[in-house]
Image: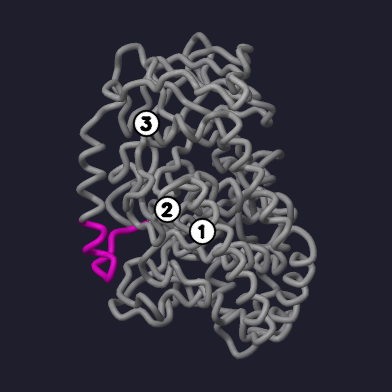
Amino acid sequence: MEFRKSAFWIPFLSGLAGVLLLAGCQADDVAPPGPPDPGPGGEVVTDALPLFRIDTRGVAIVDEPKIDADMEISDDGDLLYQGPIGVEYRGATSQLLFPKKSLGFETRDQANEDLNVPLLGYPEEEDWILYGPYSDKSLMRNVLIYDLSRAIGRYASRTRFVELEVNGVPLGVYVFMEKIKRDKNRVDLSKLNPDENTGEDLTGGYILKIDKLAGNNLGEGYNPQNSFPSSYAPSGGVQGQVVHFLYEEPDAEDISPQQRTYISNYVGSFELALASEDFADPLLGYEAYIDTDSFIDFFLLNELAHNVDAYRLSTFMHKDKNGKLAMGPIWDFNIAFGNANYCGGERTDVWAYRFNERCPEDFWLVPFWWERLLESPEFTNRLRQRWEELRSSHFSGASIRARVEGYAELLADAGALETNFAIWPVLGTYVWPNQFIGQTHAQEVEYLLSWIDARLAWMDQAITNL
């Protein structure tokens, strides 16, 4: 996400005033809510979400570095995990704007060394995320799209609604998530060691991303140490914008010069083939370089949600040993599904991949890839077939509605909605970059469902016409 001097600027400033007022209250100043209200029969709701408790040992959490802390996880009163962690704030725009901060933490042993553990049934790891939905007042946009991605066979971070306390202060509903990592249970790639610089070892595995620089600031700005540029300007740009590919795995500190050269040349060869007159040739064109099915699924997930950041921010891709370039996993959809009031983000009747036409002055633009791929009859035919297949299953209106209503029921039955919005009273107020402002959580959910229904109907026709 990024600030923009556009039509949303005035409502953004008015909303920012409220955000800054809330931001002045640190976690220690938030009054804990009272016990849950009795139900209709006088009973107390006990279907609580898992509870994460973090004790920072009297030290304030900061962006970097991680501070030492202790954590315990309980569910329905049963202690599930207890141990030391390192914890920090995470996020770029969200950390700046929102008082409800997301956290990144790593599990550690008693010697303060990183420790792989399985938490809440997830495969073991050491790096984890507690995402705090704030501008997304439905609380569920990321959960929904990640669940849909996994349902159609594309890995996305596993998610679980939880509640969080820091130093005894309740902070409301969070989403416990996996960090994007190379792992047989996550992004299943061969490990690429620093000394693997020749032969087939050099061919993978790599993870790249198109994104802002947060977390990749080796040197100043985008530079040869942390990224490489596309050889092709994004279409429609009016300020000489350049698309950059950041090194994620191996990261900028660990990737060797030979590995930098290999992966940048591979992406460059793909772009050259895609831009050529023979781009649709199965041997000479794009298909020699990419996992087309992964590109199609990535496109459909981003377009279904009309993610205003799609293809240009929080965009991951990967390449395994002896494999082709594949898109994904998807990431960061909190301002998707009609939750953005700029660059047409609220609309159900435009393509996300044509963002550059609506906002040609934006610093981060969509690469030319998608526009060019859709000129291929083979690509568009396969895209239509995949859409029809998914519309009869996981992308059906009834299936998506059942997921959304299930999340809402879970949060309501746990008493978590009342707690969350008592701590963070954002219902009925503008929080950047809201398009819709519901007075209740139910209204936020109904807006989400109505938006999805309209989006599905438009995409049915638009994909037919590609």
Along the line of sight, the residue nearer the viewer: 333 or 84: 333
Assign the magenta stretch its main secondary structure.
loop
Amino acid type at image mark 1: Tyr
Q: Quadrant of residue 281?
A: bottom right
Residue 35 vertical position relative to residue 318 in the rendered view, above or below: above
Residue 62 vertical position relative to residue 218 in the rendered view, above or below: above
* Quarter the N terminus occupies: bottom left
Residues rendered magenta in the picture: 1-13
Please tell me the numbered disc located at residue 423.
Answer: 3
| Residue density around tag 1, few if under 14, some if 14–19, many if 20 or more, within 10 Å | some
| Whether residue 216 can be seen here | no
Disc 2 designates what residue? 438
* Quarter the C terminus occupies: bottom right
Q: Secondary structure at mark 3?
A: helix
The residue positioned 67% from the left and 49% from the top of the image is 403
| Whether residue 455 can be seen here | yes
Disc 1 designates what residue? 447
The residue positioned 66% from the left and 43% from the top of the image is 406
In x, y percent, where is residue 60?
A: 29, 22
The residue positioned 41% from the left and 67% from the top of the image is 243
Amino acid type at image mark 3: Ile
In x, y percent, where is residue 96?
A: 28, 44
Residue 152 vertical position relative to residue 349 in the rendered view, above or below: above
Q: Secondary structure at mark 2?
A: loop
Q: Residue furthest top?
A: 110
